[in-house]
Image (spheres, rainbow, N blue to C red):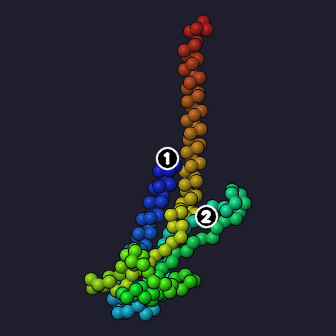
Amino acid sequence: AQINTAAQLSQLVDRQREIAQASLLDALTEYYAAQGNWEGVQSILTAALPNFPRPALGPPSGGPGNGQRRGRGSTLFVLLDARGAAVAQTGTLPFTGTLSTEQLAAALPVFYNDQIVGRLIVSSPELSLLSEAQQLVLSQLRGYAIVAALIVSMIAILIGVLISRALTAPLAQ
């Protein structure tokens, strides 16, 4: 049950990311339609960051209870124009490289008038990890499952004792 719950929460995070990506692509298309170019588009990328599911703080690096945690990964957006040149991005390191054919194919196309006017690269390190709130919910569910298992075990033992006494009572007489 715990694995299924974790998988469901992971699917929820994936769905949230898909919705956020679709919303960002819509915003970029609207921006390009209004401007006719990508000048000043940085504000759209920056505004979209809070809408993307954030990776959780990683597990303590030296085991439980040591208090050392990895820092949050951050979502990185790189917007390329139709020629593949970077026109805007988030993050601290400038994108100056060229993309391989596979990377370019994986980038999300931005369409306007049925033409690709740009491509969006979305990179989130450790995005498969659940957020802190989702980890808390999963932890609580695990706790509830343990308590429920203990209660069911106690009831089973009690029923077993009652049945054994009922069966052995005629023998005692």
Label 2, on which residue?
58
Q: Quadrant of residue 159?
A: top right
- Determine crowd level at label 2: few under 14, some 14-19, many 20+ residues with C-alpha closer than 10 A: some
How far, Cα to Cα, is label 1 from label 2? Answer: 23 Å
Q: Residue 138, which numbered label?
A: none
Q: Residue at x 70, y 65 (%)?
A: 68
Q: Quadrant of residue 15?
A: bottom left
In depth, the one of 103 and 151 nearer the eye is: 103
Question: Whole-percent x and y of residue 61?
Answer: 67, 62
Q: In the image, is residue 161 above or below residue 29?
A: above
Is residue 71 left or right of 100 when viewed as pictured?
right
Which amino acid lies under the numbered mark 2 shown in the image of this protein? Gly
Q: Residue furthest left?
A: 114
Question: Whole-percent x and y of residue 157?
Answer: 58, 28
Q: In which quarter of the image is residue 132?
A: bottom right
Is residue 104 left or right of 59 when viewed as pictured?
left
Eye-nearest disc, 1 or 2: 2
Is residue 125 left or right of 120 when viewed as pictured?
right
Q: In the image, is residue 120 above or below residue 6?
A: below
Secondary structure under badge 1? loop
Q: Which residue lies furthest to the right in this view?
A: 66
Which amino acid lies under the numbered mark 1 shown in the image of this protein? Ala
Q: Residue 1, which numbered label?
A: 1
Q: Residue at x 59, y 23 (%)?
A: 161
Sequence-wise first label, 1 or 2: 1
